[in-house]
Image: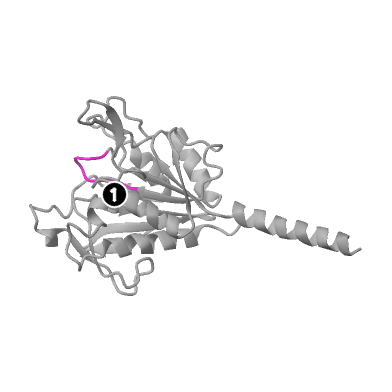
């Protein structure tokens, strides 16, 4: 009898551990709409720009470490999204979609892919859209997706910074901000502003311009800003002065994204 009890207890514990492992959230970074390459000194063509394992200025390695520290497993998606390949993702991030100047064969957003992503969000997915300014990203096709959630990237370029005049790229977030509490001053340069309608709402404005937005659809959440923002150059503390708190902002956003993931999907 005792053996049977121990066996059942062990089985229950294993089930709990398995369930906990399954509940580890997964963040998937798009490598399809952002698919840039460049040649190194040896002439080899390498994938680069806003990717997890890139340690130089344009990479996301530091932000990736923040996800790691919060127990969020990192993944990538090299193909267009489908219901199948998004199934195990809790957070899906699309950053800086390519223009025809950045890629000889840019992968543009389509109505079919936008519908897949919309349904995934509605079922509980957390979508992060980080665009860019008018010279560095594609808008006409990408807005097919963002407008599903009431968000239109205007394709302009706010906070243009001349040289090292960092103050031209400064925003000061309220101390009681719902996503970035206690962060304060951040740096976002040359970004696209937003035009919003329901279900989207602004979570940060500056001089009447919508800078950050959130949309709730079904069980899911969308967060949008018109700039990649958290690449290494502006979170590593080497370029900006200490009063800019981009690393703290990246940590705060990551924690907030994790909280948006439903307990059961």
Is residue 161 a member of the stretch shown in magenta?
no
Left or right: where does residue 247 sit relative to residue 178? left
Q: Work out whether residue 243 or residue 264 is closer to the camera in this orientation and state it.
A: 243
In the rendered image of this protein, does residue 232 appear above or below residue 51? below
Where disc 1 sits, the SS reads loop
The answer to whether one can see residue 124 in this image is yes
- Over which residues does the magenta segment extend? 130-137
Is residue 132 a member of the stretch shown in magenta?
yes
Left or right: where does residue 9 sit relative to residue 148? right
**Residue 137 appears at what percent x and percent y?**
26, 39
Number of residues whose C-alpha sits closer than 10 Å to that of mark 1, classed few (under 14), some (14–19) or many (20 or more): many
Q: Quadrant of the N terminus?
A: bottom right
Q: Work out whether residue 253 or residue 206 is closer to the camera in this orientation and state it.
A: 253
Color style of the picture:
one colour
Q: Which picture quadrant has residue 78? A: top left
**Residue 88 appears at what percent x and percent y?**
55, 45
Q: Residue at x 16, y 55 (%)?
A: 159
**Residue 59 appears at what percent x and percent y?**
29, 45
Q: Which picture quadrant has residue 2? A: bottom right
Left or right: where does residue 168 sit relative to residue 17? left
The residue carrying mark 1 is 228
Q: Work out whether residue 130 or residue 251 is closer to the camera in this orientation and state it.
A: 251
Q: Label the magenta part by its dominant secondary structure.
A: loop
Find the residue positioned furthest to the right: 1
Q: Which picture quadrant has residue 11? A: bottom right
**Residue 49 appears at what percent x and percent y?**
28, 40
The answer to whether one can see residue 199 in this image is no
């Amino acid at each position: 009898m005792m053996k049977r009890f121990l066996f059942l207890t062990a089985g229950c514990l294993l089930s709990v551990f398995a369930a906990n492992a399954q509940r580890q959230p997964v963040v998937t970074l798009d490598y399809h709409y952002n698919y840039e390459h460049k040649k190194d000194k040896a002439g080899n063509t390498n994938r680069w720009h806003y990717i997890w394992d890139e340690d130089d200025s344009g990479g996301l390695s530091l932000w990736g470490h923040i996800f790691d520290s919060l127990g969020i497993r990192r993944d990538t998606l090299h193909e267009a999204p489908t219901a199948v390949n998004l199934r195990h993702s809790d957070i899906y991030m699309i950053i800086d979609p390519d223009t025809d100047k950045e890629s000889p064969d840019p992968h543009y957003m389509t109505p079919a892919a936008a519908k897949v992503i919309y349904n995934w969000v509605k079922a509980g997915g957390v979508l992060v859209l980080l665009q860019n300014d008018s010279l560095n990203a594609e808008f006409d096709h990408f807005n097919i997706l963002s407008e599903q959630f009431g968000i239109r990237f205007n394709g302009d370029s706010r906070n243009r910074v001349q040289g090292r005049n960092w103050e031209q790229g400064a925003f000061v977030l309220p101390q009681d901000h719902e996503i970035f509490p206690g962060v304060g001053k951040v740096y976002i340069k040359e970004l696209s502003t937003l035009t919003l309608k329901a279900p989207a709402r602004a979570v940060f404005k500056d001089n009447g311009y919508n800078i950050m937005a959130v949309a709730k659809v079904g069980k899911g959440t969308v967060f949008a800003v018109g700039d990649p923002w958290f690449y290494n150059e502006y979170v590593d503390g080497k370029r900006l002065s200490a009063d800019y708190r981009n690393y703290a902002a990246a940590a705060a956003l990551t924690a907030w994204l994790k909280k948006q993931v439903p307990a059961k999907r």
